[in-house]
Image (cartoon, rainbow, N blue to C red):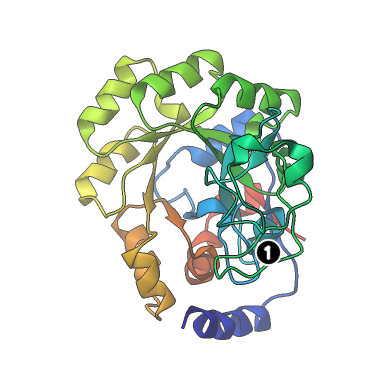
Amino acid sequence: MRNIILFFALLTFASCQNQGNYYFTLNNLNDTYELFSYVEKQSMPMVSAHRGGPYPGFPENCLETFEYNTQFGPTIIECDIATTKDDSLVLMHDNTLDRTTNGQGELGSKTYEEISKLYLVDNDGMKTNFKIPTYYQTLKWAKDKVFLTLDLKKGLSFEKVIDKVREMNMAPYCAIITYNVDDAQTVHKYAPELMISVTIIDKSDYFELKQAGIPDDRMIAFTGLSAQKPEFYSFLHEKGIRCMMATFGEIDKKAADGATTIYSELIDKGVDIIATDNPAEALIELRSKWESYSEFNKFVKFQ
């Protein structure tokens, strides 16, 4: 069903614009802070592609998939960083290679040379011609294109990931995902310049982060998998913090089955960033919203 609906949506989308891609253009960290600071009636809605937004023929955590999704709108790419046996950093969500590649076994038991011979498979199990990207390749590709939110797999140090961000001058295009206050504090102490995705499900989470020394202007608030009350979003908005909600699961399924306003309704309730497995559908649905904001003209280019 999703393929049919998206096919017709793409026909409509393609008929009203020239071919090209929407890329973020952030010249420095001040641009990043401005983009992610909530300002009433000025902050454009954004879409975060969960694991890069896989689609039939386009696997998760794959550079070609990331590029594919940028044709629909400016895209935040959430991706997973893991390490091989010889400490090479690559994009991979699972501990094993079985689901997302044509290989088998644990990623941590393989060298990069071994996995470089493999091919990624899509969510339907179909082999593609796409390779497992390294973290270095990802940062190099992403510059002047997408904003990355980096999800570190177990055992990988924040310092190692952040050092590469700094080495490649990618701080304006990256945020580190954290799941607890201690990790957020670790990231901020090591890299006070970086944006951090922090979990804020209720007000007490916010106050704990503040007590740990995390400034409001470094927070992107992940607020859960269901909509919060409008007053909760207002509480964070008053502090200039953008709110992200994940829609993977039931909401994305409804969108894939033809619900045409489901993402817009969340934006109207106070959500600023939709984290979704359906980035193409979300970007197409929200197009009239994100194109109407001054931030779009300032921080997004179409080419």
> Which residue is depicted at the point 38% across and 38% down?
221
> Which residue is depicted at the point 50% across and 53% down?
50
Corner quadrant of residue 276 = bottom left
Corner quadrant of residue 167 = top right
Left or right: residue 37 compared with residue 227: right
Residue 171 in percent (x, y) is at 64, 29
Residue 99 in percent (x, y) is at 55, 57
Vertical placement of residue 239 versus 106, above or below: above
> Which residue is depicted at the point 32% across and 20% down?
210
Taking depth in this image into account, of 37 and 131 the one nearest to the observer is 131
Q: Secondary structure at mark 1?
A: helix
Corner quadrant of residue 166 = top right
Vertical placement of residue 265 versus 136, above or below: below
Residue 49 seen: no
Mark 1: give few (<14), some (14-19) or many (20+) Cα within 10 Å: some
> Which residue is depicted at the point 20% across and 50% down?
229
- Find disc 1 in the rendering and name its residue: 68
Vertical placement of residue 72 versus 83, above or below: below
Taking depth in this image into account, of 297 and 161 the one nearest to the observer is 161
Left or right: residue 119 compared with residue 178: right
